[in-house]
Amino acid sequence: MTNSTELSRDIFDSLPKTWFDRGTAFSVLSSCFQAGREHIRMGTGFFTIKGWGLIRKYTSGKRVYLLVGINDPGEARARKALINEIMRDLRTGLDRDRRQAVLDLVQKMESGEFRIFDARAMAHHAKIYLIDCKAMIIGSSNTTGYGLIDQIETGSLVTDIQEIAARLDNFEAYFAQARDITQELLEALRRWLELARPWDIYLKTMLALGNLQPIEANYKKQPVSYQVDMIAQTLRHIREFGGSMLVASTGLGKTVVAVHVALHLHQEGEIDNVMVIGPKPVRDMWKREMRNAGIPCEYFVRQAFDKESSARDGSIKLFEEIVENIHEQRWLIIIDESHQFRNRYKQDLFNMKKQPKEAQAFIRLRTLFQNSNIKRLLLTGSPYAKNIENINNQLHLLPHTSESRVLLPNFVEDAQSWRINETDEFIQLPVASQLTTPHVAKYYGQVDGEEIYIKFGEEKRYIPKVRLHSINFPLSLETELTSAIVTGYFDLNSRKPMFRKCIEKLVKIGWASSPWAIRGVLERIIDTPGGTNQYDFKKLQFVFSRHERQQILAPIIERLKEETFESDIKLKALRRILQTLQPRAEKAIVFCERRATVVYLKQALNELMPSLRVAVTINKTEDNYQMKETKEIEQIIKQFAPVANDGVVNEENYDVFISTDAHGVGVSMQDASVVINYDIDWTPISPIQRAGRILRFWHSPRTVELYTFVPTLTDETTLRYDLLGVVRRWENLIARHGESRKFTDLPVLTAGNIQEINMSDVASQVTIKSGQLDLEDLADFDISPYYQHTAKLQLNRDYAKSISSDIISAKTNSENIPSIYVLLNYDGKYHGLVYNLKTKQLREPDVVKLLELISCTEDTETAFVDFEQVEQLSDACIQAWCEREGVNPEEVTRECALYLKPEDEGDNIKDWLNPQSDDQKASLYD
């Protein structure tokens, strides 16, 4: 009878002694390993689970000793680096047997039959395989799927006993010096085998999809946690649709977000230049930020786009030059305060039969956007004013990439422009996102006693609490002006109410503002026609003659001239507010609608409160009120708010800043803690923008106060119902503000006297209806769904970062057809894939739809399923994607996989799997 030694010798003798081709190394190794009886010693440059999967069945009953070398990360990092490398390769490419290979290797390590040593710090480069003391293979093949099967390798089979003995001594010597990493690899593989919770898949996905790759830039303002989510979502929109609209509460740092978006696009080679279109007061700020980021930037003041020709504004000539050569470079167009583009058409007030004319600004932008090299970003904190078209006009400025429902979209203008029919639809748009200060406070803030702050580096910035005040005041000269209005002394001879009552509207605005404002309007009325200060109505004229108007209005004007600052009830209320601030050294911003009122308040406060340092943006000339020069106003703002604007804090700083809404947008003035709406505005945009000057993070806890003056009537006359511009104006504003608040999530007006708001508790919990503030829990319906998801991540971010890669799980799903979700990484980019097992269809949903599909809670149970089969489904999904994209599977890594199991499915999913032959399995290594 032939003994085992002779049998082994026969096998060794039958094998080739040298080779230089593909696949022979595996054939020789497997035969030799099978012929071995006790020990297999392997020295290799690389070791992978795929390689082990190929040879594992030939090592049964034998002890395996593995020495791994090649890379030299340094002795201290060697073990961790090697294990990470093995785990990284485990999740790379396709290998439907990988789970069984890991189970086998774990069992072998637990039984002491497999030990792995790291010799990389010893500069070990050899590839050698020793089978007992009987055979030795020396060559170029690593213990990897690629090295054993696919790659052309050289090798030699040695059976000389003395030479083998010498190499055994060498191996044992190196083995004794190397570091044993068996236990660490065992622990890593055990963790890999553990089934993850659906919750872990959900968090892992959000963390991966929101992760921004580091950029090489010297820009010092690094984004904080919530800004990272904003940047990631905005970049996703721009990459997919060519543009994005970001609505974020004032003070959340839209500028920083936009600069980082530009940096990413610039570094990725997607853009060459940036053009910013926005308000004049923030021009220097934008140019400075882009300059600090190292990005070429042109800035255009929004109002310039309304000019008919470049002769009226020199910047338009530069704009036209850019448009002419736009094809030569790639641009990112940032439209700051995009709500200033809310009106696309303008009607000829004196000829309503004419078709509305498209505003010149939109015409200019349309010529710019005709080039495909343009990417667009719209920024605003308050997009809504009067109606839904305000939103749609801004959306019109985005690339027209919406799925059209028009039958023949190519023949219909703007068929693919983004639109909504209800305000609630905005947050569902895949090209828009919305984030609010209350939401940031609730989910991103950290608690410090009763205060909430956001960490900006090492600095704490506190989110203010808000106290709202509504101040009702009676209108002066009510009887006289009521009579004039009811009688129609301000009516024009037009059948259209809009034109007939247009001067009456000015009267009401001036009347509610200040004595100087109403006096100026009345003086122009009695000066028309023919006077030096007349109104130019073209063909229209007043119903009453100039003489008749003078008889009625002249006495009222005289009464107004006789009024003193002391007799002005509204002014007296303002003075009382400011007096309460002085002992606390708190600053206040006062917003007015009329320029005359700004100057009026300046003179009044200088006389009544001479110790108060008051700054205004308006100068009075001989016959008019003029805005001060931009540079002068910028210096005034810096002296009023030195902390917010990097100025100097000294005794020369102002206490009160009084302005029209021209400086209620964009500028930072949070040195002040009080905003006073001395005049209410027709739209909700202004109160929101006004409040935004101080509703910003601050270096210490504080409460900010918002005051709003509301005009009222005391006499029971028909004017209580007719004066819609005064009495009902406030109610209309409140109603509009209720719609607008869907875009701001923070009430800045109140119909009551006082309401205190804790910012952390107000996330979508307060709404304004019919002039009342209803405390109603609206959860998070007023923010974009993406941020509703990432809020859960934010609360668990540290845990999410600890979740391993390449995890699998399963959860029940309401859909009838089973599918598998796989998150993979290719070329540094993540792809969330969903593979339908019945139709074999592969899709890559947008991030919101994907998160909605896998959304779950920490308590969501893991569905019962055969996870080895889930592995096979995951491979099928990856293979389908690689075939579709023409990608080598070996360049793809798997981050996680989740089987979505129908609720009525049994516990076996084999019917959904195509049986795999051995040949098909072997092809997975290709």
Image: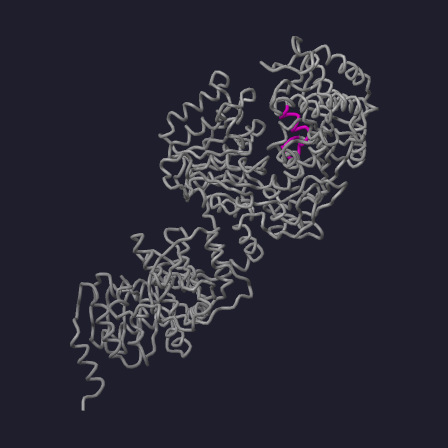
Instruction: Locate residue 846 relative to residue 654 in the image: left or right.
Output: left
Instruction: Locate residue 842 relative to residue 250 in the image: left or right.
Output: left
Q: Nearer the viewer, residue 529 or 704?
A: 529
Residue with the most extreme right position: 566
Q: Position of residue 204 (x, y in %)?
A: 48, 58
Q: Would residue 140 be visible to someone looking at this image?
A: yes
| The quarter of the displayed image where residue 699 is located | top right
Q: Position of residue 140 (x, y in %)?
A: 25, 63
Q: How many marks do you count on the picture? A: 0
Q: Position of residue 310 (x, y in %)?
A: 47, 18
Instruction: Locate residue 56 relative to residue 631 in the image: left or right.
Output: left
Range of the magenta residues? 633-647
Color style of the picture: one colour
Residue 180's place in the image compared with 411, above or below, is below
The quarter of the picture where the C terminus appears is: bottom left
Residue 537's place in the image compared with 453, above or below, is above
Residue with the most extreme bottom position: 1
Is residue 891 covered in magenta?
A: no
Residue 872's place in the image compared with 262, above or below, is below
| The quarter of the displayed image where residue 580 is located | top right
Q: Would residue 239 be visible to someone looking at this image?
A: no
Is residue 646 covered in magenta?
A: yes
The quarter of the picture where the N terminus appears is: bottom left
Q: Position of residue 142 (x, y in %)?
A: 29, 64
Query: Which residue appears at 58% of the width and 14% of the height?
Result: 539
Q: Nearer the viewer, residue 408 or 858?
A: 408
